[in-house]
Structure formats: C-alpha cells, structure tokens
Image (cartoon, rainbow, N blue to C red):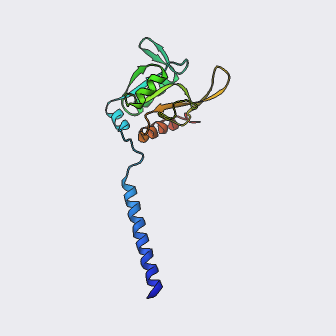
Amino acid sequence: MGSTYFSRAYAAVIGVGCALMLAVCGCAQLPVDPEGTLEGVRAHTLRVGLSPNPDFVNIQGSDYSGSEVSLVRDFAEHLETEPEFVVAGEETLVKQLETGQLDLVVGGISSKTPWTDQVGLTRAYRETVDALGEDVKLVILVRPGENAFLSELEYFLDQRGHTT
C-alpha cells in the first residue's frame, strides 16, 4: 500500500484540482470591459472623437468625411448602433476618452502616438506615408482597459482586411 497508494492519491488530488481550475476559468467570459463599453455602445451610441487630419478625418461644418470616418460608421453598423461624433484636438479627445466620455478616437493617429500611457490602442490596421515620406502605421485609440470593446474592434478590422 505504501508509496503507490500515496502517488495515486496525490495524482487524483492534482487531477481534481486541475479540473476545478478549468471549470472556474471556463465560467469567466474573457475579455471583459470593467466599464461596460461594448455593452453600452450596443445599447446606445458609439461615441467617437474626431481629430481633423486630411484624408482620414475631414470636417466641413457638420459634415464629416474621410477614410476613418467611413470606417467608424461601418463599425457602428457592425455593432447595430449609430455613431455620435465629437470634434476636437487630440489632447482634448484623449482626456474625454480617459474619463469615459468617448469610446474611441480617430484622426490619422500613428502607432508612435505619445498617448500610449493614457489610453488603449488597436494593433496597426493600416500603413501610409506621411508628409515627410516616412512610413506610418495607423491605430485607433480606445478607452483604457476596455478589452472586450478593443477585441471587437480588432475583430472588425481583421474581417475587413485592415490589419497590417
């Protein structure tokens, strides 16, 4: 009975522990949004910060156009909601993103943005060339920590063939 019995008992305890761990982990839905951004967007509107930048975000009165404005409108349609736009400079928009007044910000924003410590960002979804002839990878800024929302946005970008 000696060591073989204890080895089997130990293996059984480890097996049960692993099974319980998998069961508990399987119950948690990941990724999550601590502030409920994805749920809120689907229930209400997609609050979008627009930072003017030719080709990506153009503002003429209350008319918004450009490749990123179109992309955001398509994302809102994907989520079965409507976009609500706020126009301002990047610094103001980042503050609004941090405080939860916005869900995302676009405006030809580079992956080398100085805002990485304050907000979340998507993987680079497009490459372009800036006015200096430098290659630039574009990202979309999102609320920090809202990983389910970020995951849904990146899934949308992947489906549209927009990731580099």
Q: In the drawing, does residue 3 fall left or right of residue 38?
A: right
* Image vertical order of residue 44 relative to residue 10, above or below: above
Residue under the point 44% across and 22% down: 92
In this rendering, the answer to whether 52 lies above or below 74 is: above
Quarter location, residue 86: top left
Q: Residue at the far top: name it.
A: 61
Which of the 4 image quadrants contains residue 137? Answer: top right
Q: Position of residue 141 (x, y in %)?
A: 48, 31
List x then y, in percent, for residue 16: 39, 69
Relative horizontal placement of residue 114, taking residue 145 as reference (left or right): right
Q: Residue at x 54, y 37 (%)?
A: 123
Image quarter where the N terminus lies is bottom left
Which residue lies most toward the left here? 43
Q: Position of residue 155 (x, y in %)?
A: 48, 39
Residue 36 % position (x, y) = 35, 38
At 41% from the left edge and 33% from the top edge, which residue is drawn? 78
Q: Nearer the viewer, residue 85 or 14?
A: 14
- In the foreground, 93 or 124: 93
Quarter of the figure that contains the C terminus: top right
Residue at image coords 42%, 46%: 31
Relative depth, front residue between 131 and 95: 95
Residue at far bottom of view:
1
Total labels: the figure holds 0
Of residues 62 and 1, the one drawn nearer to the viewer in this rendering: 1
